[in-house]
Amino acid sequence: MADKIIRVLLVDDHQVVRRGLRTFLEIQEDIEVVGEASDGAEGVARTEELRPDVVLMDIKMPGTDGIEALRRLRELDNPAKVLIVTSFTEQRTVVPALRAGASGYVYKDVDPDALAGAIRSVHAGHVLLQPEVAGALLAQDDAGGGTGRGSTLTEREREVLGLIADGRSNREIARALVLSEKTVKTHVSNILMKLDLADRTQAALWAVRNGAAG
């Protein structure tokens, strides 16, 4: 039996998709499907109500889509990790979703075992990016300029940034640097503010591009 059960919420407007995902995920010893939602607005409400660890969210849905739902969750400071489920033809929507706070994405035809691995990975604090999407994000950052902002970081903040780039969670960073989680959260907030970044995904990419990754 798994030591830690990962609580998952499914958000997709197609019932057959949700049913298929639930059927597969429920045979995983360490994953529990705690609820479903059929659009972004319901997904936000259910995420607030059920407090899942990971949300599997479709991007294209009628009414409130996945990107708008992500923005609302971030405004609510909801801690759930969001894994976007998209198709190859919708790649252009992935970058806005990551900007809105998604922890990564998988394609709708993903192998079931790979999907379970992706859920475990984002739950552990990792960022799931394909090279082409990472490149698109970095290109947007370059267009915005400001790659020299790292000089404002303290030595400790650079250590924290390097561990973010390695995909470590706040808890893992705290353990590695012998700090409290609260102190790590403060460092992360300072890093994002100093580098003018929106989230950990952008921070990880900034670190890789600028040689701050471990």
Image (cartoon, helix red, strand yellow):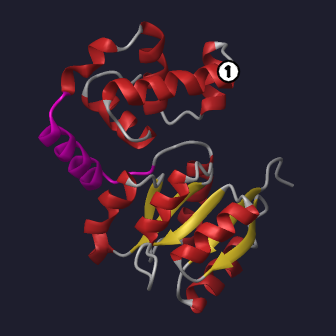
In the figure, is residue 106 to the left or right of 145?
right
Query: Horizontal and vertical percent for residue 186?
Result: 56, 23
Q: Is residue 163 visible?
A: no
Location of mark 1 (residue): 175
Kind of residue at disc 1: Arg
Residue farthest to the front, as pictured: 75
> Is residue 86 in sight in this rendering?
yes
Residue at (47% x, 71% y) in the render: 110
In this view, the residue in front, 69 or 10, is: 69
Question: What is the x, y in percent for residue 148?
Answer: 20, 20
Residue that lies at the very extreme toward the top in this rendered image: 155
Tell me if mark 1 has few (under 14), some (14-19) or many (20+) residues whose alpha carbon lies within 10 angstroms of its own.
few
Residue drawn at point x = 41 percent, y = 16 percent: 158
Say which of 71 and 125 sits in front: 71
**The N terminus sits in image quarter:** bottom right
In magenta segment, residue 131: yes
Above or below — where is 164 with respect to 108? above
Q: Is residue 169 above or below residue 14?
A: above
User: In the image, residue 168 lies at what x, y percent?
Assistant: 55, 33
Above or below 137: residue 95 = below
Using residue 39 as the reference point, say whether residue 161 is left or right of it: left
